[in-house]
Amino acid sequence: MNAVKDVVVVGAGQAGLSAAYFLRRSGLDFVVLDANPGPGGAWRHRWPSLRLGKVHGIHDLPGRKLGSADPDRPASAVVADYFGAYEREFDLPVLRPVAVKAVRDNGATLVVEAAGDTWETRALISATGTWDRPFWPHYPGQAEFAGTQLHTADYRGPERFAGKRVVVVGGGASGVQALMELAPGAAATTWVTRREPVWREGPFTPEYGREVVAKVAERVAAGLPPTSVVGTTGLILSPEVVEARRSGVLRRLPMFDRLTRDGVAWDDGRFVPADTILWATGFRHSLDHLAPLGLRAPGGGIAVDGTRVVADPRVHLVGYGPSASTIGATRAGRAAVAELREHLAETVTTGP
């Protein structure tokens, strides 16, 4: 068991590093535990062909701007370099690779357990994101499909799809990006989604952003699983997307009813042959390590007020619900640290 910390941060992505920056300025004793072998958070897992110039934007971490970067470099490499330099500049105590398995109530403190080590802490900021929990929906015939099935979490570029008949499932940005990238080399592509895609025209204004965040915040305050902030904004009509829609690459079909051995089928008799199914079906928040604390609300989510978990004020979720975006993570990190400073001061004054 290590010495008791004021705060343990789990995760060193955008949200975790933002929280760590404000913790460093606060004077609280803290450590950051990150499961990855190196810096970059979820960005380090993005496919190599995803260039910086193709992503929607990377918001600056507090205290240091990303600055100008080569738009033709892989986004994964740019962000890994940026996050690594950030950790060094602010001397952030990041330990890795440390995969947190469980957080348990120890009375006045919490015990954070990882393989071979534990930390005792007075408070916890969980900033684990979603990348290691890809969501795979279940459809009839899935086990009988003779081709390849993979999730966008495993997508590494268009090369393996060359000459293949590919069905891309999902109406989010990652599915659209992958489809546009692999379509030129594939034998055929089909795009299917459960709902009609929502296309976003015009600028993404601050007013619209606040409206989207407020909708997500309302859900998590009620203890419901959060919807994605990015997903709620709709798909941006970039020039590349406009061209892909014109050419038919982004012609959407409704969700199929079942998989067969050699394709996908609808109850109305339609059939599309396929060699590969790419499930661009999103992710769920990685919160299994918090299960021993019993924080789940009846609605299936964890009820939070801002970033504070309603059921346990020692625990804050950053990068969850309304703060699950690069710009929201910085604001949430600042708010979580400010509230924890106040909470920990009150605990010292009043005692456990």
Image (cartoon, grey):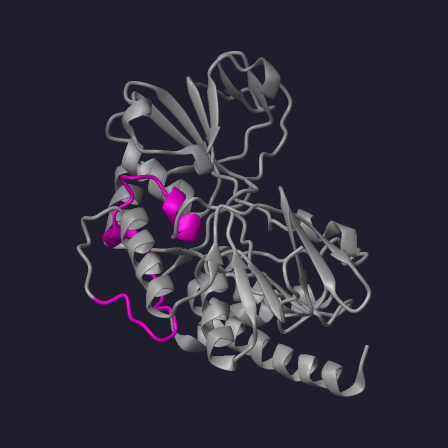
Dominant secondary structure of the magenta stretch? loop
Residue positioned 35% across, 33% down in the render: 156
Q: Is residue 10 above or below residue 212?
A: above
Residue positioned 39% across, 48% down in the render: 38
Q: Residue furthest bottom?
A: 349
Residue positioned 55% across, 29% down in the render: 256
- Would residue 49 be counted in the magenta stretch? yes
- Would residue 187 be counted in the magenta stretch? no
Q: In this view, does 89 lie above or below 230?
A: below
Q: In this view, does 39 lie to the left or right of 255?
A: left
Image x and y of residue 152, in percent: 44, 37
Q: Can residue 223 be seen in this view?
A: no
Residue 217: quarter of image: bottom right
Image x and y of residue 68, in percent: 19, 64
Quadrant holding the C terminus: bottom right
Q: In this view, does 237 lie above or below 312?
A: above
Q: Is residue 89 left or right of residue 1?
A: left
Residue positioned 28% across, 48% down in the render: 77
Q: How many marks?
A: 0
Image x and y of residue 277, in percent: 46, 26
Q: Nearer the viewer, residue 197 or 170?
A: 170
Residue 320: quarter of image: bottom right
Q: What stretch is highlighted in magenta?
A: 40-67
Q: Nearer the viewer, residue 245 or 347?
A: 347
Q: Which of 293 and 95 is in front in this view?
A: 95
Image x and y of residue 187, in percent: 29, 20
Q: Can residue 163 be seen in this view?
A: yes
